[in-house]
Image (tube, rainbow, N blue to C red):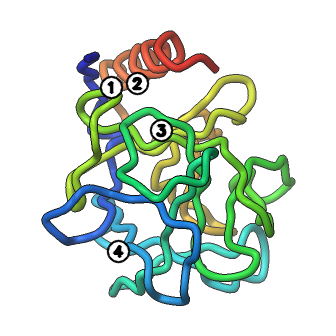
Amino acid sequence: MSEIAVPDSVKVWKIGVDPANVRSWNNYTNNQGYHLFCTTNGNFLTYEKVPVGVNLGFKSSGDNKTHFRLPDSQEREILSGESIALGIGGKPSFLRYKSRSVGINLDWSETPVFEWRIIGPELNKPIRENMPVAIINDKVQPDPDFLIYFKRVVGADVGWTSSPGFWDQVRSAAEKVAVKAAKEFIKSKIGG
C-alpha cells in the first residue's frame, strides 16, 4: 500500500502493550481499554479532572481507558489511516475537536465522533500495539493536525503542531518541513 514517513516529533503515542493489533469495540467497560502511552514524557494520557480546559492529564501508570469505534460499528482490527472515534474513559468518553479559549481545542461527546485517525508505518494496514504511532484529527483548523505532547502552563499538556509555541519546543526546521510533508501526504491519501 502506501508507506508513510511520519516524523518522530508527532509519532509520540503507543497504544496497548500486547503482541496484537489495535482493535475497535462497541461496548467499553471501565478500565478495559488500552493504555495510551506518550513517548515524549514517558507517561500515560488519560481522563483527569482539571480546573481549566478539557479533562485530560498524564499519569505515571496506565489505566486502560482508551478505546476506539469505527463508523460501521464493526469490532475488528483498525487499519492505519481509517476514520475512528477516540474514547478515553466512560461517559462522556469520546473526544472531538471544539474551539476553546484555554488549552487544546477538544471537548467531550456522549456519542462517537469519527474525526480521528491512527497513523502507523503503512496506510491501510493493521496497527500493532505498543509501537510508536501518530494520531491525527481531521477537524483541526485550518488543516487536519497531529495530536502531540505539548507543555502548557494551563490545561492538559497536549496540543497540535499548529498550537502557538509548539515549534519553539521542537527547535528543528527540518522536523517542521517533515511534519508538513507528512500532513500533506496523509491529506492526499485520505482526504481532509
* Quadrant assignment, res 107: bottom right
Image position of 157 (left or right of 171): right
Under circle 2, the secondary element is: helix
The residue positioned 81% from the left and 49% from the top of the image is: 98
The mark nearer the N terminus, 3 or 4, is 4
The residue positioned 60% from the left and 40% from the top of the image is: 137
The mark nearer the N terminus, 1 or 3, is 3
- Residue named by callout 2: 179
In this rendering, which labeled residue sits more in front, label 2 or label 1?
2
Q: Quadrant of the C terminus?
A: top right
Of residue 16 and residue 107, the one placed in the foreground of this image is: 16
In this rendering, which labeled residue sits more in front, label 1 or label 4?
4
Cα–Cα gap, marks 2 and 3:
14 Å
Count residues near mark 4 (Cα–Cα under 10 Å), then give few for <14, some for 14-19, many for 20+: some
Indicate which disc residue 43 carries: 4
The residue at the far top in this view is: 188
Q: Amino acid at mark 4?
A: Asn
Cα–Cα gap, marks 2 and 1:
6 Å
Q: Does the CB distance between marks 2 and 4 fall below 8 Å?
A: no
- Residue named by callout 3: 168
Indicate the position of residue 90 as horizontal and vertical percent values.
65, 82
The mark nearer the N terminus, 1 or 4, is 4
Count residues near mark 3 (Cα–Cα under 10 Å), then give few for <14, some for 14-19, many for 20+: few
Under circle 1, the secondary element is: helix
In this rendering, which labeled residue sits more in front, label 2 or label 3?
2
Indicate which disc residue 175 carries: 1
